[in-house]
Image: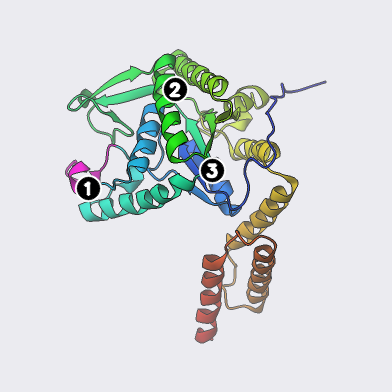
Amino acid sequence: MKWTTPVTVATDKGFVRHGMPILMLGSCFADNIGIYLQESKFDVCLNPYGTLYNPESIACAIERLAENRPFVKSELRHDGNLWYSYMHHGSFSAGDADATLQAINRSYERAARLLPCCQRLIVTWGTAYVYKLKETGETVANCHKQPEKLFERTRMATSEIIARWEAVTKLLHSYAPQCRVLLTVSPIRHLRDGAHPNQLSKAALLLAADALCQRYPKTYSYFPAYEIVMDELRDYRFYADDMTHPSTAAVTYIRERFAEAYFSPQTAGLAAACEKIATGLRHQPLKGCDTPAYRHFAASLLQQMDELTKCCDTIDYTKEKKEIEQLLQHNGNEL
């Protein structure tokens, strides 16, 4: 007897490889896959604007990267406590304008350098609802808890999303011709919109994604994260305490389905070895870093890193090795 309804994922082995420049944009669900890829040492630039939710804001983010136009102080807003940008997530906000701008542009410049050579753009749409600032008519990526009266809330129609992303497609074809786009719709429900409006929103996103895949099959493909959660994992044990976000087990399962679909056997082996090292790097010794046991453990990690970098010269552990070596040296000096 079957206890689930399996979702078929169109496989494309080798679609994601180490050394391949990858840009990821979108909702917090993009972070779940992106962090896994980063820990597995793929060349990933993850959410350079912070978490983005709607197709319009993500399109604007890509266009701004292609313009190679860093942000200026006049684009920031101040609410009396924090400086923020309506194009960015609140994680960039700070009490100092220069610190906010520096963080924004440091992230922006890395992504702008990557875009022309980007080979994979992985996009996760979260909602078709957008908030437009009444003062300017611009769609904001984040309202930053500003008064609701400042914004007009609307839902993008499927045709509007398609037209907007056809313009993005044209831009990518000319600016990053090697780039292929993987679209995903976030399974995280926006229940503040209401159950039925959330379904309408997701439907608009799903129809738009399908239309782009049909019209531009050489550019777009689709990973069914939404369907996997809604069908295969149709049980509240696969949700976090808020009953909205996927649980750790659900996220792990989706990562596995992603890897099965897009990793070659060689890439899967490298990723598994990188995951093992990442687990080791998160290890916190109970008795401090100056014990023989920890030194042996650290030496083993360093050896694993050396072996991996010899197998694949695009995998880089320079930063991690330096941190371990400095830690061991520091503790050795204290003995």
Is tag 2's residue or tag 1's residue first in the polypeptide sequence?
1
Which image quarter: residue 253?
Answer: top right
| Residue lying at the far right of the rendered structure | 1
Where residue 43 sits: x, y (%)? 54, 52
Residue 190 seen in the figure: yes
Q: Which residues are magenta?
A: 72-86
Of the residues shown, which amino acid type is indicated by label 1? Val
235 sits to left or right of 160: right
- The three-letter amino acid code for the residue at tag 2 is Leu
Amino acid found under the numbered disc labelled 3: Gln
Foreground tag (3 vs 2) = 3
> Residue shown at 54%/20% (left/top)?
215
Q: Nearer the viewer, mark 3 or mark 1?
A: 3
- Residues tagged 2 and 1 counted as in contact (Cβ below 8 A): no
Closest to the observer, 219 or 278: 219
**Residue 334 lies in the magenta-colored region:** no
Q: Is residue 82 magenta?
A: yes
Q: Residue at x 63, y 57 (%)?
A: 279
Q: Is residue 75 left or right of residue 302?
A: left
Q: List the single residue furthest toward the front.
A: 174
The one nearer the camera, 231 or 167, is: 167
Q: Which mark is residue 191?
A: 2
Question: On the image, numbered disc 3 is attached to which residue?
Answer: 119
Are the two marked residues, 3 and 2, in contact with CB atoms closer than 8 angstroms? no
Mark seen at residue 49: none
Q: Position of residue 209 (x, y in %)?
A: 52, 23
**Which quadrant of the rendered structure holds the N terminus?**
top right
Q: What numbered label is drawn on residue 72?
A: 1
Q: Quadrant of the C terminus?
A: bottom right
Q: CA distance from mark 3 to mark 2?
A: 35 Å
